[in-house]
Image (spheres, rainbow, N blue to C red):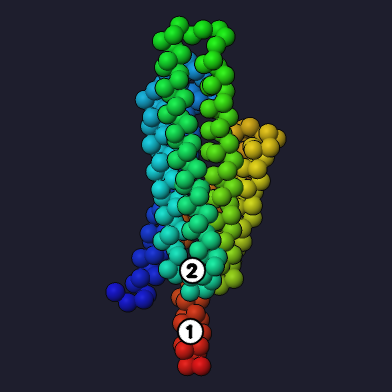
């Protein structure tokens, strides 16, 4: 397989992973409405299958999110190995914390079922433990993981912007949207906003739209051949020197 085919395949793979990760993440929230209910200990037990489906979708999002940076690494390291490696590291951290959040969901589901079986006592350790698990899940799922995502995204969007591998309006959009996503994550951890509140959704909407646009661009157009040719020329010159 020649270099052009390799780069084209990389673009298609990255674009496909972006679509899967974004849709899996968004759909997971539709299945996890009971987790955000005021009576969540009862609602989670009553909607156990939906919670399980939501957890599986988060797992898919976690794996594909990390895979995006990994798939881009062979190409991006030619432009900036440090930033490319940093992107992989932070997207892996993102995935790990999403998996920690899944563990929180499993524990909440187990606790909810035990709570219902115990007759839903008005005041008990169930509520205390449930509050702690829910807070921890929100911290890692809506705070730490999105912040790690934002840092990783900033690194590969910086390379895209500097090199012109994708249009600069698109990579610039990604830079701004990644910062907004980080602001949302930090705000959740600081208690300034609630997960899935209106302002939380508004802050995350730009990156969701941007990644969908970029995914389609990569699948249809691929990377800018001029930017790749420029890198090859610089590499050849350096080898001669």
Q: Position of residue 190 (x, y in %)?
A: 68, 37
| 216 vs 48, nearest the viewer | 48
The residue lying at 44 percent from left, 34 percent from top is: 103
Q: Is residue 140 left or right of residue 49?
A: right
Residue furthest left in the image: 1
Give the vertical position of 151 relative to 236 (above or below).
above
Sort mark 2 into few (<14), some (14-19) or many (20+) by Cα contacts within 10 Å.
many
Position of residue 136 measured from the top left corner of the image (x, y, whole percent): 56, 32
Residue under the point 64% across and 52% down: 179
Return the disc, 1 or 2, that comes first in the chain's sequence. 2
Measuring from the top left, give residue 229's x and y in whole percent: 47, 80
Q: Which residue is mark 1?
A: 235
Residue for point 45% across, 20% down? 111
Q: Position of residue 79 (x, y in %)?
A: 52, 73
Q: Is residue 66 above or below residue 54?
A: below
Q: Disc 1 on helix, strand or loop? A: helix
| Quadrant showing the N terminus | bottom left
Asked whether the residues under the numbered discs 1 and 2 touch, taking CB atoms below 8 Å apart as contact, a structural biologist would say: no
Determine the residue located farthest toward the right in the rendered image.
192
Which residue is rendered at x = 50% and y = 43% of the image? 97
Viewer can see residue 222: no
Task: For mark 2, give the secondary structure.
Answer: helix
- Looking at the image, is 114 positioned above or below residue 54? above
Q: Is residue 240 visible from the viewing direction of this image?
A: yes
Which disc number belongs to residue 76?
A: 2
């Amino acid at each position: 397989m020649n270099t052009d085919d390799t780069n084209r395949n990389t673009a298609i793979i990255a674009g496909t992973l972006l679509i899967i990760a974004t849709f899996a993440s968004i759909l997971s929230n539709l299945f996890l409405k009971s987790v955000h209910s005021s009576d969540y200990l009862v609602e989670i037990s009553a909607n156990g299958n939906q919670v399980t489906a939501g957890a599986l979708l988060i797992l898919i999002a976690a794996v594909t999110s990390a895979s995006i940076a990994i798939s881009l690494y062979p190409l991006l390291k030619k432009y900036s190995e440090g930033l490319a490696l940093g992107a992989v590291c932070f997207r892996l951290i993102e995935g790990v914390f999403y998996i920690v959040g899944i563990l929180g969901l499993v524990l909440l589901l187990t606790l909810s079922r035990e709570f219902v079986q115990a007759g839903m006592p008005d005041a008990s350790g169930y509520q205390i433990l449930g509050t702690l698990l829910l807070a921890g899940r929100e911290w890692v799922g809506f705070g730490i993981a999105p912040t790690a995502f934002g840092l990783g995204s900033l690194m590969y969007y910086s390379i895209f912007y500097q090199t012109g591998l994708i249009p600069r309006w698109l990579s610039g959009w990604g830079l701004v949207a990644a910062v907004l996503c980080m602001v949302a994550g930090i705000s959740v951890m600081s208690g300034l906003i609630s997960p899935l509140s209106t302002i939380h959704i508004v802050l995350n909407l730009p990156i969701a739209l941007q990644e969908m646009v970029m995914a389609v661009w990569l699948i249809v157009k691929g990377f800018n051949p001029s930017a790749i040719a420029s890198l090859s020329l610089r590499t050849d010159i350096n080898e001669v020197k």
